[in-house]
Image (cartoon, rainbow, N blue to C red):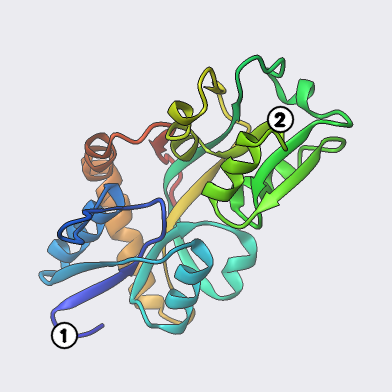
Amino acid sequence: MKTGQVRVALYVPQYTKNPVTGELGGWCVDIVHALGAELGIKGVPVEHPNPANALTSIASGACDAGIIGIEADRAAKIDYTAAIVEVDYTLLAPAGSPYRSIADVDRPGVRIAAVRHHASTIALNKIIKHATFVYADMPEPTFQILQRGEADLFASLHEVLRHYVTRLPGSRVWEGRYGFNPLGMAVPKGQAARLAFLSEFAERAKASGVIQKAIDGSGWSGIRVSLSAR
């Protein structure tokens, strides 16, 4: 760690950015600040455009830690605490869509817009056997696939999808979830003492209500404090 600060990798959409001041905000940013306060130094959120870039920053040591989805393949590069939150995966359906369950969707000819390599897509790929995926690399172009009528549904995080409803009149975000993304705190491989400290911090933050308060203040939907622990 650099003297006087702890740098924590975050990625879109984990934070918001003030267009005037450039200041970052959101539930993850609040947790970074709480971590800094715990250490008696400055908690610095470091923005990244996607999870892959955040993963690289954590694994390389460019950042001291990160908050990132827990995936088995990532464990070869970084070590995790237990999950701190669960973020729901669901689907966005346009006006007049007849699909209301995964069973309805999973049939030949149904097209699902999804972000390539995103955890929500990986999870749905394990469920879907007959429908077809139509990919883009970021949420906005993926939404545009649905908007142009080139897909029947859009799969992503609940929090991401709810922001597109107003841009597609008559659309709706499905109730419930087809899976969820467990997010934990992570460190570069070989940092056992740092991981142990973060694991203890994460459990205290869950038990004390720090993480719930951060979620409540962010206005996020489809997210809950994880009950899992080591």
At a point 10% along the width and 69% down the height, the residue shown is: 40
Return the residue at label 2: 152
Q: Residue furthest left?
A: 40
Position of residue 19 in the picture relative to residue 56 (left or right): left
- Give above or below for 104 relative to 17: above
At a point 62% along the width and 38% down the height, the residue shown is: 155
* Residue 150 horizontal/vertical position (percent): 72, 37
Whichever of labels 2 and 1 marks the residue nearer the N terminus, that label is: 1
Q: The disc labelled 1 sits on which kind of residue?
A: Thr
Q: Which mark is residue 3?
A: 1
Query: Can you tell which of label 2 and label 1 is closer to the viewer?
Result: 2
Front in this rendered view, residue 61 or 25: 25
| Label total for image | 2
Are there few (<14), some (14-19), or many (20+) residues within 10 Å of tag 1?
Answer: few
- Give above or below for 160 relative to 62: above
- Give above or below for 153 relative to 19: above
Q: CA distance from mark 2 to mark 1?
A: 51 Å
What SS does tag 2 mark? loop
Q: The disc labelled 2 sits on which kind of residue?
A: Asp
At a point 32% along the width and 53% down the height, the residue shown is: 15
Image quarter (top left, top right, bottom left or bottom right) of the N terminus: bottom left
Position of residue 98 in the picture relative to residue 29 (left or right): right
* Residue 116 horizontal/vertical position (percent): 66, 55
Image quarter (top left, top right, bottom left or bottom right) of the C terminus: bottom left
| Quarter-of-image position of residue 154 | top right
